[in-house]
Amino acid sequence: MTITDRLIAPNATRSEAALCYSAAVIGAVTAGLLARGSSVLMIVVVALVGFDLFGGAVVNATASAKRWFHRPGRHARHHLTFVAVHVQPFLLALVVPGFGGWTAAAIYGLVVAAAVVVTSAPNHLRTPIAFAATVFGTAITTAVLAVPTFLLWFGPVLLIKLLLAHLLPEPGTVDDRVPLPPT
């Protein structure tokens, strides 16, 4: 198994790989530049988180990753585990002054709770519920929680990566038809 198979998905195309790696590198550079003026440790951690989240949002949106993460035998438990292992809020709380433990817990809890709701919903409601959770979660993470200005991207990008890109299967791969009322 190659590094691309592990970081993107088995059978990812060259175009997908180029796009994903580009998004990850540009995300790391962007996040690092936004954190400039901070300690070297903080810049490195923020850049690594940027690499994972910006790149991961694009990875999870590729057809290859959709096929891999939503292949037969994968269930809500697998998707919720994937969401739950994203403990970056707590990593940021350890190294970024002004990004406290309560903020980390609130963002983490919001994302995990939203993922539970999305994966528990009927197929035909998962997409609109994921979008609702993402837009309201974005409002909360940017306007309600105490987040340093240079990290205002963090909550929205985490929500996009996990709720919109990861949890939603490729369109047309599930029976998401809603029965129409009789006419």
Image (cartoon, rainbow, N blue to C red):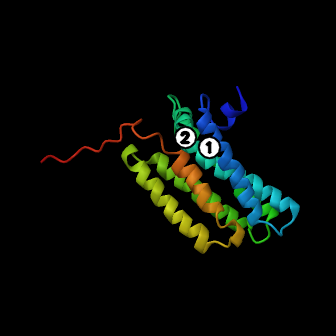
Q: Residues within 10 Å of mark 1 (few under 14, many from 20)?
A: some
**Amino acid on which the number 2 mark rests in the picture:** Thr
Q: Quadrant of residue 159?
A: bottom right
Q: Which residue is mark 1?
A: 19
**Amino acid on which the number 1 mark rests in the picture:** Leu
**Residue at point 82% right, 56% down?**
44
Q: Nearer the viewer, residue 124 or 55?
A: 55
Point out the residue furthest to the left here: 183
Q: Is any atom of residue 87 visible in this view?
A: no
Q: Nearer the viewer, residue 55 or 75?
A: 55
* Residue 174: x %, y % from top left: 40, 37
Q: Nearer the viewer, mark 2 or mark 1?
A: 1
Label placed on residue 88: none
- Residues under labels 2 and 1: Cα distance? 10 Å
Say how many tags the image has: 2
* Residue 140: x %, y % from top left: 57, 69
Q: Residues within 10 Å of mark 2 (few under 14, many from 20)?
A: many
**Residue at point 54% right, 47% down?**
165
The vertical placement of 55 against 15, above or below, is below
Q: Is any atom of residue 33 visible in this view?
A: yes
* Residue 8: x %, y % from top left: 64, 37
**Residue at point 60% right, 70% down?**
142
Q: Which residue is mark 2?
A: 62
Question: The N terminus appears in which quarter of the rendering?
Answer: top right
The vertical placement of 2 against 166, above or below, is above
The vertical placement of 121 against 72, above or below, is below
Q: Is 121 placed left or right of 141 in the picture?
A: left
**Residue at point 77% right, 60% down?**
32
* Residue 127: x %, y % from top left: 43, 50
